[in-house]
Image: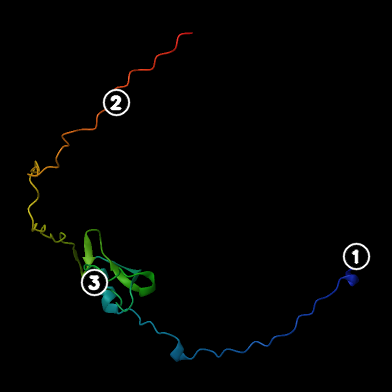
């Protein structure tokens, strides 16, 4: 039977931990407050103000009618305010506007015409041998009489 007094105690050495200085105001990044104009123009044009991850440095209320403002990877993005417009609309930086049709890109013109079919047969085909290898014609074996 083990008593509480017979259990050994383990002592650990004391390690001093250096004090870290408190951050100064210069160490804390300041995020500017959204401009009242951006909020007002968004709401007045039918949009709602929302948070979204957009490319770092793009700022609040980017032009969502263009491709790319909010298409960066997570390490190259930051949280900004965006104007979420009604379906079928995008925010052009000033107001919500109807999304136009996607631009059409003309099909490339081929530089070489496609082959015509049937494909012409070459004029010098591979010659067929005139004396093929003869096939042996051995008679089937006969069984000896019992």
Q: Distance between the residues labelled 1 and 3?
A: 75 Å
Give the residue at mark 2: 136
Disc 2 vs disc 1: which is toward the camera?
Answer: 2
Q: Which of 105 and 137 is in front in this view?
A: 137
> Mark 1: which secondary structure?
loop
Disc 3 vs disc 2: which is toward the camera?
Answer: 2
Q: Do the residues labelled 1 and 3 touch (CB within 8 Å)?
A: no
Give the residue at mark 3: 63
Q: Nearer the viewer, residue 16 or 24?
A: 16
Q: Quadrant of residue 76?
A: bottom left
Of mark 3 and mark 2, the one earlier in the sequence is 3
Q: In this view, does 54 lie above or below 139?
A: below
Q: Nearer the viewer, residue 55 or 106?
A: 106
Image mark for residue 92: none
> Is residue 78 something that shows in the picture?
no
Q: Is residue 94 left or right of residue 123?
A: right
Q: Distance between the residues labelled 3 and 2?
A: 86 Å
Residue at x 38%, y 17% (from the top left corner): 141
Q: How crowded is mark 3: few (under 14 residues within 10 Å), some or many (20 or more)?
A: many
Q: Position of residue 50 (x, y in %)?
A: 34, 68
Give the residue at mark 1: 2
Q: Where is residue 138 in the image (x, y as percent from the top left)?
A: 32, 21
Q: Quadrant of residue 118?
A: top left
């Amino acid at each position: 039977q083990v008593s509480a007094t017979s259990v050994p105690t383990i002592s650990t050495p004391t390690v001093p931990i250096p004090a870290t200085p408190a951050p100064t105001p210069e160490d804390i990044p300041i995020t500017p407050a959204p401009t009242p104009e951006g909020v007002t123009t968004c709401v007045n044009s039918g949009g709602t103000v929302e948070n979204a991850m957009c490319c770092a440095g793009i700022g609040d209320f980017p032009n969502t009618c263009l491709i790319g403002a909010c298409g960066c990877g997570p390490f190259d993005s930051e949280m900004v305010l965006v104007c979420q417009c009604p379906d079928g609309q995008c925010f052009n930086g000033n107001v919500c506007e109807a999304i136009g049709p996607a631009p059409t890109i003309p099909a490339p013109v081929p530089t070489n015409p496609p082959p015509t079919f049937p494909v012409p047969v070459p004029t010098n085909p591979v010659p067929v041998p005139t004396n093929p290898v003869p096939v042996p014609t051995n008679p089937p074996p006969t069984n000896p009489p019992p």
